[in-house]
Image (cartoon, helix red, strand yellow):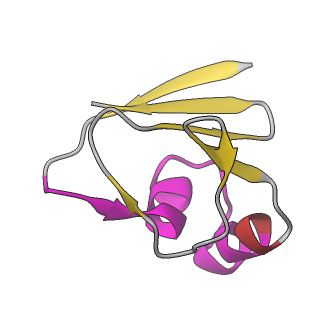
């Protein structure tokens, strides 16, 4: 599993934008599809909200990636 650390510079980032910015998803549409297909976990729980507000301390898991938000 590839570990990615993402430094958040605002209060939050929408989940699909995070997946796109980190390169886990090829595009926003691909990121949205991953969420709809139950492929994304936030802090160990499947996340179904595309616009979920990811904040510092969250860990996002999808495919072979783990994204830690700092």
Q: Seen in the image, is 58 located left or right of residue 37? A: left
Picture quarter with the N terminus: top right
Of all residues, the one furthest to the left in this rendering is 10
Residue 53: x and y in percent read: 36, 64
Task: From this view, report whether residue 24 is shown above or below residue 17.
Answer: above
Of all residues, the one furthest to the front in this rendering is 45
**Residue drawn where x is 61% and y is 29% of the image:** 66
**Residue drawn where x is 66% and y is 67% of the image:** 31
**Residue drawn where x is 71% and y is 67% of the image:** 35
Residue 50: x and y in percent read: 57, 74
Task: From this view, report whether residue 46 is shown above or below residue 63.
Answer: below
Q: Seen in the image, is 4 located left or right of residue 33? A: left
Picture quarter with the C terminus: top left
Q: Check if residue 27 falls in the magenta segment.
A: yes
Total numbered labels placed on residues in the image: 0
Q: Check if residue 34 falls in the magenta segment.
A: no
Front one among 7 and 26: 7
Of all residues, the one furthest to the right in this rendering is 37
Front one among 37 and 24: 37
Asked which quadrant contains residue 54, the reply is bottom left
Residue 14: x and y in percent read: 40, 67
Asked which quadrant contains residue 61, the reply is top right
Of all residues, the one furthest to the bottom in this rendering is 29
Q: What stretch is highlighted in magenta?
A: 10-33
């Amino acid at each position: 599993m590839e570990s990615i650390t993402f430094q958040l510079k605002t209060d939050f980032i929408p989940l699909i934008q995070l997946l796109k910015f980190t390169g886990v998803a090829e595009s926003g549409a691909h990121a949205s599809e991953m969420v709809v297909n139950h492929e994304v976990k936030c802090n160990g729980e499947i996340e179904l909200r595309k616009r979920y507000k990811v904040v510092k301390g969250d860990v996002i898991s999808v495919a072979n990636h783990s994204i830690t938000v700092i």
